[in-house]
Amino acid sequence: MKKVQVLSVLIVLFLFSCKKQDSTGEPTPEQYDIQFNVSGFSQEISDISSTKPMASTSSAGDYVSYIYYYIYNEKGNLVKSGKHEDKYSKDFSYPQEKLTNGQYTIVLVASTARLTSFEWDTLWSLSFGPYDKSQPFGDTFARSLTFEVNGRSGQFDVRLERVTAKLELTINDKLPADLTSFTLSYPSNAYFSALGNFGAVRSYLFSHTITQEDRNSWYRWQTFVMPETGSSSVAGDVIIKGYNSNQQLIVTKTIKGVTFTKNKKTTLTGNLNSDAYMTFYSGVDTSYTGTIKYGF
């Protein structure tokens, strides 16, 4: 009987000892609320089609539809990420996370079109591309920011910068009667990275079916192009091809060596009819919302 009692006491003492050791373990690091304010985002955007800034707005959702963010520790490893795809949500432009003390880098990307991310585990490999590979980029803005959490909650105001160029096509002459559709191919990078590296240049192909509205007046179409790093531009040929209802090629135009530069608009203006007078001109406006013009 005494042996049983002694054994019971030893078991109790052992369990108490284990509990005591557990209670002296490392405490859980305290976390702090960190918020990133991009609500002034659209106030920083100038209309790329003119020299006048956009009217001031109170929400990023007044222009972009998607916001993505990735937070990395000082070793470049991912610790937090998120996306806001409801532009009407009250917290759309206020990414917020709980972080412990330390140094971090956040990558913020906003766009008018949905994006997809690749290899997001480390800061050096993070990149973005169109959600649908067959579709071009939307108007896209990005910024990386290094910050420190030091024993208190905080808020950081972040200004995003445009990383895309704009392509605008205008056809001035009357469209051929038998023209039912046309395609437009142009160069653009397939993706861009958080650190400014860009993917291989590919040719995007846009297809359009002619409507009666197109025939009533001159035709205009626009898209956004992802330039290269370094010079912040990409160059290549733009090819326009027109087809009849039997998908036979009836007209083609090639504008060689067209340059697309970040935060600038490239305009292509001319006539589709083969017998129309052709003029080629170009010019670069070095202002913030400059325009590069090509005629055909």
Image (tube, helix red, strand yellow):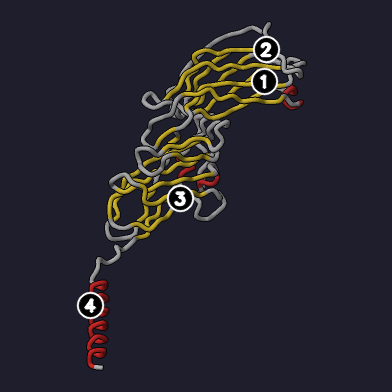
The earlier-in-sequence mark between 1 and 4 is 4
Local secondary structure at mark 2: strand
Residue 59: x and y, percent? 51, 48
Residue 150: x and y, percent? 27, 57
Dots 3 and 1: beta carbons under 8 Å? no
Residue 267: x and y, percent? 55, 21
**Which quadrant does the N terminus fall into?**
bottom left
Local secondary structure at mark 3: strand
Residue 276: name its quadrant: top right
Q: Disc number at residue 182? A: 1
Residue ID at (26%, 73%): 23
Dots 1 and 2: beta carbons under 8 Å? yes
The earlier-in-sequence mark between 1 and 2 is 1
Estimate the spatial distance between the alpha carbons at disc 3 and disc 4, rounded to whole Å.
43 Å
Local secondary structure at mark 1: strand
Tell me which amino acid carries mark 3. Answer: Gly
Q: Find disc 2 in the rendering and name its residue.
A: 251
Q: Nearer the viewer, residue 186 or 270?
A: 186
Tell me which amino acid carries mark 2. Answer: Val
Q: Find disc 3 in the rendering and name its residue.
A: 82
The earlier-in-sequence mark between 2 and 4 is 4
